[in-house]
Amino acid sequence: MPFDSFDAFYHSDLQSVYLLQILPALFLVYWWAVAGPNQTPALRFVRLYCGVFCVETLIDPVATGPLVAWLGGGGTALGLLFVLLGDFRVFVLVFGICSPERDWKGVVGEAALWAPIVAISGYALHAAIGLACGSAPGQLLWMLHEILFVLLAGYVRNRLIPARTGADDPNRAKLQRTVSFVMLYYGLWAFSDALILWGDLDVGWLVRVVPNQLYYSVWIPFVYATFFSGAGRASVPSSP
């Protein structure tokens, strides 16, 4: 193969930048050219959400890769910002669909309170492990974040969404499906990190490519397809 290892492939611009841009770019063209059918306020919310966060998805790998290299530093802070944005986008969708009576300001405000929970908890736990064991590998920090987010997303899917949506709300199942998708890519990330950390297996980097694609390339098209299937039957959050 053209790379010496899966590790080298994973950290190459081919995998970490260019392959992550193809589907979001194609989706953005589709999003721009085609209005969603039966534009209820709920679907207008989802459509605007997908447009905004598709652009953010396209910027993320460029900003945290080639841009950081060109600037000669600042990668850690910028990487953390986009990790938080990646979690933030999940909560914006959840609270935007669950709270039809609220405007964008309220949705964004609540999402901003939830987004740092896992990052702060993961950092604290990583630091505690480092103190207890003398050191903790950096990859463990990512793995802790991934496991903790799976747990939090499970709570959101099984407890928070049913508590905030009616039993007859067709958006409940759709929203739970999208959160299950989040649990899938975070779970795959954690599995790949376990292969890397504890198995010292180069194939772990190849496995990591799959959740990368789900997170960057597939998330927005998946959200759009989920809510626009059976368009017009969604409940109605306030439009922006």
Image: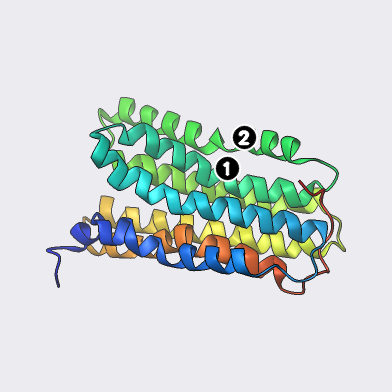
Q: Taking 186 as reference, is 225 left or right?
A: right
Q: Residue furthest left?
A: 4
Q: Quadrant of the N terminus?
A: bottom left
Q: Nearer the viewer, residue 227 or 69?
A: 69
Residue type, label 2: Ala
Per the rendering, the mark at residue 112 is 2
Relative to 199, 18 lies left or right = right
User: In the displayed structure, would residue 23 be above or below residue 55?
Assistant: below
Q: Residue at x 30, y 61 (%)?
A: 15
Q: Quadrant of residue 41?
A: bottom right
Q: Which residue is mark 1?
A: 88
Report how far apart the C-alphas of labels 1 and 2 lie in the structure. 6 Å
Secondary structure beneath label 1: helix
Tell me which corner region of the image, top left, top right, bottom left or bottom right, holds residue 188.
Answer: bottom left
Q: How is the image coloured?
A: rainbow
| Three-letter residue code for mark 1 | Phe
Residue 225: where, in percent of width, then height? 64, 70
Q: Find residue 178 and report its horizontal and vertical position in percent.
A: 63, 61
Label 2: state its secondary structure: helix
**Residue 138 seen in the current view:** yes
Pointers 1 and 2 in contact (C-beta within 8 Å) = yes
Query: Mark 1: few, some, or many residues within 10 Å (few <14, many ≥20)?
Result: many
Residue 134 is drawn in which quadrant? top left
Residue 240 position within the rendered picture, expressed as x and y whole percent measured from the top left: 76, 46
- Observer able to see residue 201: no
Q: Is residue 113 above or below residue 162?
A: above
Image coordinates of residue 26 in percent, x first then y, are 49, 68
